[in-house]
């Protein structure tokens, strides 16, 4: 299992995920991030401009999803 972190960028601030979550691979972490983005989208336009960054344990950004992006893609 690999620990992935889901940092949120919003209005010039970054909210760091200090705990992360364990997933078997990046595809599973992307699916989790897509669900998270859909949850934020469900709160209306309040989170427009927000993005979720998937990072590894070394802090390297592996992917980023923005509000308004096609979050059904989890390839």
Image (cartoon, rainbow, N blue to C red):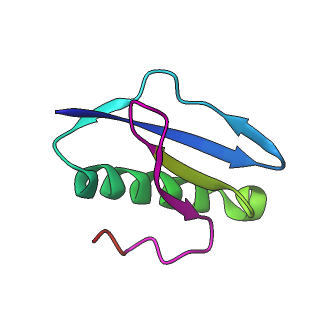
- Residue 48 inside the magenta-drawn segment: no
**Looking at the image, which residue is at 53% across and 62% down?**
65
**For this rendering, which residue is in front, 38 or 23?**
23
- Give the x, y percent position of residue 39: 51, 54
- Give the x, y percent position of residue 60: 47, 42
**Looking at the image, which residue is at 60% across and 64% down?**
66
- Tell me if residue 58 comes above or below residue 11 in the rendering: above
- On the rendered image, what quadrant is the C terminus found in? bottom left
Which region of the structure is painted magenta?
A: 55-72
**For this rendering, which residue is in front, 13 or 48?**
13
Secondary structure, magenta segment, majority class: loop
- Give the x, y percent position of residue 63: 46, 58
**Left or right: residue 29 compared with residue 63:** left
Q: Kindly indicate the quadrant of the structure image that contains residue 48.
A: bottom right
**Looking at the image, which residue is at 61% across and 30% down?**
16
**Looking at the image, which residue is at 39% across and 30% down?**
57
| The residue positioned farthest toward the right in the image shown | 12
């Amino acid at each position: 299992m690999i620990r992935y972190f889901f940092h949120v960028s919003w209005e010039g601030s970054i909210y760091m995920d200090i705990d992360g979550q364990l997933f078997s691979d990046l595809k599973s972490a992307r699916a989790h991030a897509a669900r998270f983005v859909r949850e934020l989208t469900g709160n209306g336009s309040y989170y427009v401009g927000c993005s979720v960054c998937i990072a590894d344990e070394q802090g390297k950004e592996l992917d980023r999803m923005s509000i308004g992006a096609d979050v059904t893609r989890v390839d």
